[in-house]
Amino acid sequence: MKNCLCPVCGAAAAPAAAGLLKCGACGLVFKTEKDPGPAVYAPGLEEGIYAAAKENLFASALDFLGRVLPRRGRLLDIGCAAGELMKAAAAQGWEADGVELDPSLAHKAAGLGFHVYSRPVEDSFLDSETYNAATVFEVFSQMEDPARAVSEIFRVMRPGGYIYIREFNAAFHLPLYALEMRGVFKPLGLSPSVVHNFNFRAKTLRVMLESAGFRDITVRNSPPTSGDPYRTGGALGGFLTGALKVLYYWLTQALWLITFRRVFAGSTLIATARK
Ligand SMILES: [Zn+2]
């Protein structure tokens, strides 16, 4: 009954919905049958998903890292796609490397002059204490073994280095998924929920980072991507979907404040921590 133990904290997990188990301790929701490999998007969507819609999010990540590590150093971007974040980091004085399993994206990133590892980070055999910063944008959800990956990231980071994570929030997507399964969004052609192999909430990210050895952990709601890069808004179109996402973000921030920073309802979370 290996499937009944949480792969992040080891506590018991119970059925949450069809094909999904939920950990009673850290709140991780995971698929009983894993999707093979990284997500595949329709042709033409990748540019929006990996680059344009995330420009501002990459800039905030680099602002944060530049503030806590003013002397910069080496940065490892896990799930670097075609190298957009590495390009922005290099422009700010970082020496950036990437990890990317999709061969065509890895090839594009390498074409920009970056060193790109094409094996999972937990099997990349990188030297210990090499990187000052690590960025992980929506990748833990699709990994084989996120807990092992975060321990490996901890090992390759220098003491005092920072990790910056953006990840889908299960507390938002799973209730939405339940409604979607009941056909609630069908009339508008919406498909707003994102359910991957591993679905984290704020507590899960904290537990996972803490067990790997990280400290000074912070978790907050993430601002949304611009527009509708995943085309989940159906008949609403890009502009309206984008506007609703911004409105929803401010509502989640209000909820977070009135619950004394305890309730995270955002569609995505940002976590940071120090080694
Ligand atoms: Zn757990």
Image (cartoon, helix red, strand yellow):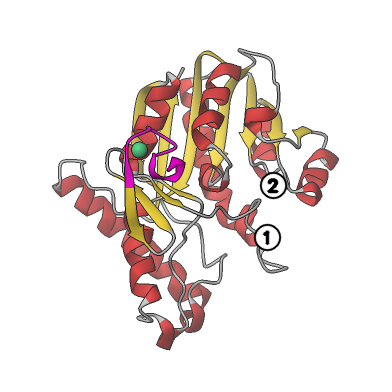
Q: Is residue 9 above or below residue 108?
A: above
Residue at figure coordinates x 83%, y 45% from the top left: 107
The x, y position of residue 124, in whole percent, is 70, 27
Residue 166 part of the magenta segment:
no
Mark 2 is surrounded, within 10 Å at the Cα level, by few (under 14), some (14 to 19) or many (20 or more) other residues, namely: many
- Mark 2 secondary-structure assignment: loop
Q: Closer to the camera, 146 or 229?
A: 146
Q: Which residue is mark 1?
A: 46
Residue under label 2, please give it. 81
Q: Earlier in the sequence, mark 2 or mark 1?
A: 1
- Say left or right for 129 vs 44: left
Q: What residue is rendered at 39% in x and 80% in y?
A: 185
Main secondary structure type of the part rendered in magenta:
loop
Residue 198 vs residue 98: left or right?
left
Between 202 and 266, the residue placed more toward the observer is 202
Q: Which residues are magenta?
A: 1-13
> At label 1, which amino acid type do we have?
Glu
One can see residue 92 in this view: no
Quadrant containing the N terminus is: top left
